[in-house]
Amino acid sequence: MMIRRMISFFGVVIILFACQDNKKVNPYINDLNIPPAVVAQLDTPNYTKIAWLDSVQDFGTIKDGESVTIRYEFKNTGNKPLFISDVKPSCGCMVTDYPRDIIMPGKSGELKATFKSFGVHGMMHKTILVTTNTSNSIFHELKFSGLVTDSSGRK
């Protein structure tokens, strides 16, 4: 009986400490089912800073029907946790993928955009609007351009 109580006690202690450590890593975890990125967006006194390594890119020339993936690297240059809360491509011809988890100070991440060139020709200029919890603007515009030729290679 005594051993069971001790095991139960230690089990509760381990769970409590595990939860506390999780809160230290991500202070925006909550029991309300609100995504931590949304809570971080509201916590303006604790905004951080982001540095994009290259926010403007050129994918070169591709043929109609081909896809190209553009990678945008960034770093949390502030001293608070970084969250990307929203990513909006300028058209339905793009699919984006980005970190939904916390990016700690000093750490880096990558946002990927795949551009699908079905039925379009000529020079393309596209944008992606990224929303973050950052004091150097909460909105960041990423750009890319390139030439899409028809399947024979003509512009």
Image: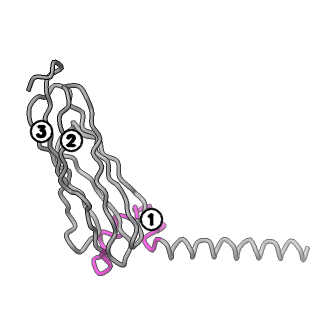
Above or below, 92 relative to 75: above
- Under mark 1, the amino acid is Leu
Percent position of residue 38, x then y: 34, 64
The mark closer to the camera, 2 or 1, is: 2
Residue under numbered circle 1: 32
Q: Earlier in the sequence, mark 3 or mark 2?
A: 2
Find the residue positioned furthest to the top. 152
Which segment is the magenta one? 26-48
Percent position of residue 46, x then y: 32, 79
Residue plotted at (38% across, 63% down): 108
Which label is found at residue 59?
A: 2
Q: Quadrant of the N terminus?
A: bottom right
- Helix, strand or loop at label 2? It is strand
- Helix, strand or loop at label 1? It is loop
Which label is found at residue 22?
A: none
Q: CA distance from mark 3 to mark 2?
A: 10 Å
Residue plotted at (26% across, 71% down): 134
